[in-house]
Amino acid sequence: MEVKVLNVSGKETGAKVQLPEAIFGIEPNDHAIYLDVKQYLANQRQGTHKSKQRNEIAGSTRKLYKQKGTGGARAGSVKSPLFNGGGRVFGPQPRDYSFKLNKKLKSLARKSALSYKAQDSSIIVLEDFNFDSIKTKNYVQLTADLNVTDVKTLLVLPAANNNVYLSSRNLKKTKVVTADQLNTYDVLNAGKLLLTTGAVKLLEEAFAK
């Protein structure tokens, strides 16, 4: 798949880049995508939720009232889950939600997500660039020139770039990552995928291993 390379002003540079069919042109595997996204979201969970069981509630252990003759149900403790302020039955406890997936499956999921973007013509290739200073208006101008102001965008850089990253950080619909940080969830969550030429080369090398 051949794509024209644009500059930061949104104009064609005259160069073209070949997106490898083995990465951007495979038959997408929806189940692999499902598992990878599920793992990504699960790994984001802190798992620090906690409720007190009846053995953790502070309160008297005396029997509230006599067993029989009251006309009501028997009750043996103020800590009973039936009473307001009592312990909770089978409440949430701290746990680790993360789980592992095979490397080949995660690779297949990422390639499937990239192939979906290629099928939808949602990939824009930019020449490698840098900002002279950290200014949000620089990134706003970039999105305006590329006509993606109202679209969620994911910019993939070949290496960390502090000026570009910090210039985009205050914008809600933008995210900047490096090629080695690319994940299935972010690719699918973006309306447009912005790849620099350097990032395309790194992705090709990474998936070729």
Image (cartoon, rainbow, N blue to C red):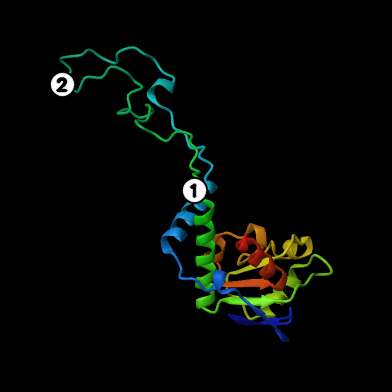
Q: Name the one closer to the observer, 152 or 160.
A: 160
Residue 2 horizontal/vertical position (percent): 61, 82
Q: Quadrant of residue 176?
A: bottom right
* The C terminus sits in image quarter: bottom right
Q: Is the residue 83 above or below the residue 111 in the image?
A: above
> Which of the numbered marks, if any, corresponds to residue 42?
1
Residue at image point 52% right, 45% down: 45
Q: Name the one closer to the observer, 112 or 61.
A: 112
Residue position for label 2: 71
> Which of the numbered marks, if any, corresponds to residue 87?
none
Residue at image point 79% right, 70% down: 130
Q: Label 1's element?
A: helix
Crowding at dot 1, Cα within 10 Å, few <14 / some 14-19 / many 20+, comes out as some
Q: Quadrant of residue 196?
A: bottom right
* The N terminus sits in image quarter: bottom right
Residue 134 horizontal/vertical position (percent): 80, 65
Gap between marks 1 and 2, in whole Å? 49 Å
Q: Name the one closer to the observer, 44 or 151.
A: 44
Residue at image point 72% right, 69% down: 198
Q: Is residue 90 left or right of residue 28?
A: left
Which of the two labelled residues, at mark 1 and mark 2, occupies the earlier sequence position?
A: 1
**Is there any visible trace of residue 185 in the rendered image?**
no
At label 2, the amino acid type is Gly
Q: Name the one closer to the observer, 88 or 47.
A: 47
Q: Is residue 126 left or right of residue 70?
A: right
Question: Of the residues tagged 1 and 2, which is closer to the observer?
Answer: 1
| Numbered circles on residues, count | 2
Residue 148 horizontal/vertical position (percent): 62, 77
